[in-house]
Image (cartoon, grey):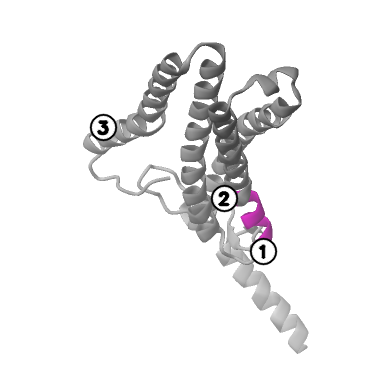
Protein backbone atom coordinates (compact mmCIF):
# COMPACT_ATOMS: atom_id res chain seq x y z
CA UNK A 1 0.00 0.00 0.00
CA UNK A 2 1.35 3.42 -0.85
CA UNK A 3 2.25 5.93 1.85
CA UNK A 4 -0.31 8.41 0.47
CA UNK A 5 -3.13 5.88 0.92
CA UNK A 6 -2.09 5.16 4.49
CA UNK A 7 -2.00 8.87 5.30
CA UNK A 8 -5.43 9.41 3.75
CA UNK A 9 -6.96 6.58 5.76
CA UNK A 10 -5.32 7.82 8.96
CA UNK A 11 -6.69 11.30 8.37
CA UNK A 12 -10.14 9.84 7.76
CA UNK A 13 -10.03 7.90 11.05
CA UNK A 14 -8.94 11.03 12.91
CA UNK A 15 -11.80 12.95 11.31
CA UNK A 16 -14.29 10.32 12.48
CA UNK A 17 -13.05 10.49 16.06
CA UNK A 18 -12.69 14.25 16.17
CA UNK A 19 -16.08 14.94 14.61
CA UNK A 20 -16.94 17.66 12.14
CA UNK A 21 -15.31 20.99 12.78
CA UNK A 22 -15.93 24.46 11.44
CA UNK A 23 -13.98 27.67 11.14
CA UNK A 24 -15.07 31.11 12.30
CA UNK A 25 -14.15 34.50 10.82
CA UNK A 26 -10.97 34.58 12.91
CA UNK A 27 -9.74 31.31 11.42
CA UNK A 28 -10.31 29.30 14.62
CA UNK A 29 -11.43 25.69 14.38
CA UNK A 30 -14.11 24.58 16.78
CA UNK A 31 -16.47 21.66 17.20
CA UNK A 32 -19.65 21.36 15.23
CA UNK A 33 -22.45 23.10 17.18
CA UNK A 34 -24.67 20.06 16.64
CA UNK A 35 -22.37 17.87 18.69
CA UNK A 36 -23.32 18.86 22.26
CA UNK A 37 -20.94 16.39 23.75
CA UNK A 38 -17.97 18.32 22.36
CA UNK A 39 -19.09 21.64 23.83
CA UNK A 40 -18.53 22.64 27.46
CA UNK A 41 -21.29 24.15 29.56
CA UNK A 42 -20.62 27.70 30.75
CA UNK A 43 -21.67 29.20 34.08
CA UNK A 44 -24.77 30.68 32.43
CA UNK A 45 -25.91 27.29 31.11
CA UNK A 46 -24.90 27.80 27.47
CA UNK A 47 -23.10 24.99 25.69
CA UNK A 48 -20.44 26.77 23.66
CA UNK A 49 -16.69 26.83 23.20
CA UNK A 50 -14.62 29.89 24.21
CA UNK A 51 -14.38 30.88 20.54
CA UNK A 52 -18.15 30.61 20.08
CA UNK A 53 -18.65 32.67 23.21
CA UNK A 54 -16.32 35.40 21.90
CA UNK A 55 -18.21 35.40 18.58
CA UNK A 56 -21.55 35.75 20.40
CA UNK A 57 -20.22 38.57 22.59
CA UNK A 58 -18.92 40.38 19.51
CA UNK A 59 -22.29 40.07 17.76
CA UNK A 60 -23.97 41.53 20.85
CA UNK A 61 -21.53 44.45 20.79
CA UNK A 62 -22.35 45.06 17.13
CA UNK A 63 -26.06 45.25 17.96
CA UNK A 64 -25.36 47.80 20.69
CA UNK A 65 -23.14 49.80 18.37
CA UNK A 66 -25.91 50.05 15.78
CA UNK A 67 -28.19 51.69 18.35
CA UNK A 68 -25.66 54.10 19.82
CA UNK A 69 -24.02 55.02 16.52
CA UNK A 70 -27.35 55.90 14.92
CA UNK A 71 -28.25 58.19 17.79
CA UNK A 72 -24.94 60.04 18.00
CA UNK A 73 -24.66 60.39 14.22
CA UNK A 74 -28.08 62.07 14.03
CA UNK A 75 -27.24 64.31 16.97
CA UNK A 76 -23.81 65.26 15.60
CA UNK A 77 -25.27 66.01 12.18
CA UNK A 78 -27.84 68.30 13.77
CA UNK A 79 -25.20 70.13 15.80
CA UNK A 80 -22.96 70.67 12.78
CA UNK A 81 -25.76 72.45 10.92
CA UNK A 82 -26.58 74.88 13.75
CA UNK A 83 -24.00 77.58 12.79
CA UNK A 84 -25.61 77.83 9.36
CA UNK A 85 -29.01 78.68 10.82
CA UNK A 86 -30.21 82.30 10.77
CA UNK A 87 -30.68 82.51 14.55
CA UNK A 88 -27.15 81.37 15.37
CA UNK A 89 -25.98 85.01 15.40
CA UNK A 90 -28.40 85.64 18.27
CA UNK A 91 -26.45 83.38 20.64
CA UNK A 92 -24.42 85.19 23.26
CA UNK A 93 -20.79 84.40 24.07
CA UNK A 94 -21.61 81.86 26.79
CA UNK A 95 -24.04 80.02 24.56
CA UNK A 96 -21.54 79.86 21.72
CA UNK A 97 -18.92 78.47 24.09
CA UNK A 98 -21.40 75.89 25.34
CA UNK A 99 -22.23 74.98 21.75
CA UNK A 100 -18.55 74.38 20.96
CA UNK A 101 -18.18 72.19 24.06
CA UNK A 102 -21.20 70.13 23.03
CA UNK A 103 -19.85 69.72 19.49
CA UNK A 104 -16.51 68.56 20.90
CA UNK A 105 -18.31 66.02 23.10
CA UNK A 106 -20.39 64.79 20.16
CA UNK A 107 -17.37 64.35 17.89
CA UNK A 108 -15.45 62.55 20.65
CA UNK A 109 -18.40 60.25 21.27
CA UNK A 110 -18.62 59.45 17.57
CA UNK A 111 -14.92 58.59 17.47
CA UNK A 112 -15.22 56.33 20.52
CA UNK A 113 -18.26 54.45 19.21
CA UNK A 114 -16.65 53.88 15.82
CA UNK A 115 -13.37 52.75 17.40
CA UNK A 116 -14.49 49.11 17.97
CA UNK A 117 -15.18 48.78 14.24
CA UNK A 118 -11.72 50.08 13.40
CA UNK A 119 -10.23 47.82 16.07
CA UNK A 120 -11.91 44.81 14.50
CA UNK A 121 -10.65 45.74 11.05
CA UNK A 122 -7.05 46.22 12.25
CA UNK A 123 -7.07 42.93 14.19
CA UNK A 124 -9.00 40.87 11.64
CA UNK A 125 -7.74 37.27 11.41
CA UNK A 126 -5.14 37.86 14.16
CA UNK A 127 -6.81 35.21 16.36
CA UNK A 128 -7.42 37.70 19.17
CA UNK A 129 -11.22 37.77 19.23
CA UNK A 130 -11.41 37.54 23.02
CA UNK A 131 -9.11 40.52 23.48
CA UNK A 132 -10.99 42.34 20.74
CA UNK A 133 -14.22 41.87 22.68
CA UNK A 134 -12.59 43.06 25.92
CA UNK A 135 -11.12 46.14 24.24
CA UNK A 136 -14.38 47.02 22.49
CA UNK A 137 -16.24 46.65 25.78
CA UNK A 138 -13.96 49.15 27.52
CA UNK A 139 -14.16 51.64 24.66
CA UNK A 140 -17.96 51.42 24.54
CA UNK A 141 -18.23 52.05 28.28
CA UNK A 142 -16.27 55.27 27.86
CA UNK A 143 -18.29 56.14 24.75
CA UNK A 144 -21.57 55.74 26.64
CA UNK A 145 -20.33 58.16 29.32
CA UNK A 146 -19.51 60.73 26.64
CA UNK A 147 -22.88 60.09 24.99
CA UNK A 148 -24.65 60.94 28.23
CA UNK A 149 -22.59 64.12 28.61
CA UNK A 150 -23.31 65.10 25.01
CA UNK A 151 -27.07 64.74 25.32
CA UNK A 152 -26.99 66.58 28.64
CA UNK A 153 -25.06 69.41 26.98
CA UNK A 154 -27.62 69.60 24.19
CA UNK A 155 -30.44 69.84 26.74
CA UNK A 156 -28.58 72.61 28.55
CA UNK A 157 -27.99 74.57 25.34
CA UNK A 158 -31.53 74.25 24.00
CA UNK A 159 -33.20 75.22 27.28
CA UNK A 160 -30.77 78.11 27.70
CA UNK A 161 -31.67 79.48 24.27
CA UNK A 162 -35.41 78.91 24.56
CA UNK A 163 -35.91 79.77 28.26
CA UNK A 164 -33.12 81.00 30.55
CA UNK A 165 -30.02 79.76 32.34
CA UNK A 166 -31.84 78.73 35.53
CA UNK A 167 -34.39 76.60 33.70
CA UNK A 168 -31.62 75.16 31.54
CA UNK A 169 -29.55 74.19 34.58
CA UNK A 170 -32.50 72.45 36.24
CA UNK A 171 -33.46 70.60 33.04
CA UNK A 172 -29.91 69.47 32.29
CA UNK A 173 -29.31 68.41 35.89
CA UNK A 174 -32.53 66.42 35.95
CA UNK A 175 -31.68 64.71 32.69
CA UNK A 176 -28.14 63.92 33.89
CA UNK A 177 -29.52 62.26 37.02
CA UNK A 178 -31.95 60.27 34.89
CA UNK A 179 -29.17 59.11 32.58
CA UNK A 180 -26.92 58.16 35.50
CA UNK A 181 -29.72 56.17 37.12
CA UNK A 182 -30.90 54.39 33.95
CA UNK A 183 -27.54 53.78 32.30
CA UNK A 184 -25.20 53.13 35.22
CA UNK A 185 -26.99 52.58 38.53
CA UNK A 186 -29.76 50.29 37.25
CA UNK A 187 -27.37 47.80 35.57
CA UNK A 188 -25.39 47.52 38.81
CA UNK A 189 -28.57 46.88 40.79
CA UNK A 190 -29.68 44.19 38.34
CA UNK A 191 -26.21 42.59 38.44
CA UNK A 192 -26.20 42.61 42.24
CA UNK A 193 -29.62 40.95 42.38
CA UNK A 194 -28.58 38.38 39.81
CA UNK A 195 -25.50 37.64 41.90
CA UNK A 196 -27.66 36.99 44.96
CA UNK A 197 -30.07 34.79 42.99
CA UNK A 198 -27.25 32.80 41.38
CA UNK A 199 -24.24 33.03 43.71
CA UNK A 200 -22.28 30.42 41.75
CA UNK A 201 -22.27 32.41 38.50
CA UNK A 202 -19.49 34.95 38.43
CA UNK A 203 -18.46 34.91 34.77
CA UNK A 204 -20.06 37.66 32.67
CA UNK A 205 -21.25 37.13 29.13
**98 and 73: which one is in front?**
98
Question: Which residue does the image show at 61% across and 63% down from the upper left?
Answer: 28
- Magenta stretch: give its range: 116-122
Residue at the disc numbered 3: 193
187 left or right, relative to 14: left
Per the model, the C-alpha gap separating discs 2 and 1 is 13 Å
Residue visible at 48% across and 27% down?
A: 152
Q: Can residue 59 be seen in this view?
A: no
Q: Mark 1 points at which residue?
A: 125
Residue 157 visible here: yes
Relative to the observer, which residue lies in front, 58 or 94?
94
- Residue behind mark 2: 55
Q: Earlier in the sequence, mark 2 or mark 1?
A: 2
- Per the image, label 1 sits on a secondary structure element best described as loop
Tell me if residue 18 is in the magenta stretch.
no
Residue 121 counted in the magenta span? yes
Q: Which mark is residue 134?
A: none
Location of residue 125 in the rendering, given as x and y in whole percent from the top left corner: 66, 64
Residue at (50, 39) in percent of width and height: 146
Q: Where is residue 2 in the image (x, y as percent from the top left)?
A: 77, 88
In this image, 1 relative to 71: left or right? Answer: right
Amino acid sequence: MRDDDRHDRADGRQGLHAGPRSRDDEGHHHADPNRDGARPTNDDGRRETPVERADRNWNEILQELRVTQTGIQILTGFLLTVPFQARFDELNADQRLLYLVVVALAVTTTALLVAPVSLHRMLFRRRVKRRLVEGADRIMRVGIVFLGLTVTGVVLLVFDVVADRTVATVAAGTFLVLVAAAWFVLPRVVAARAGRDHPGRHTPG
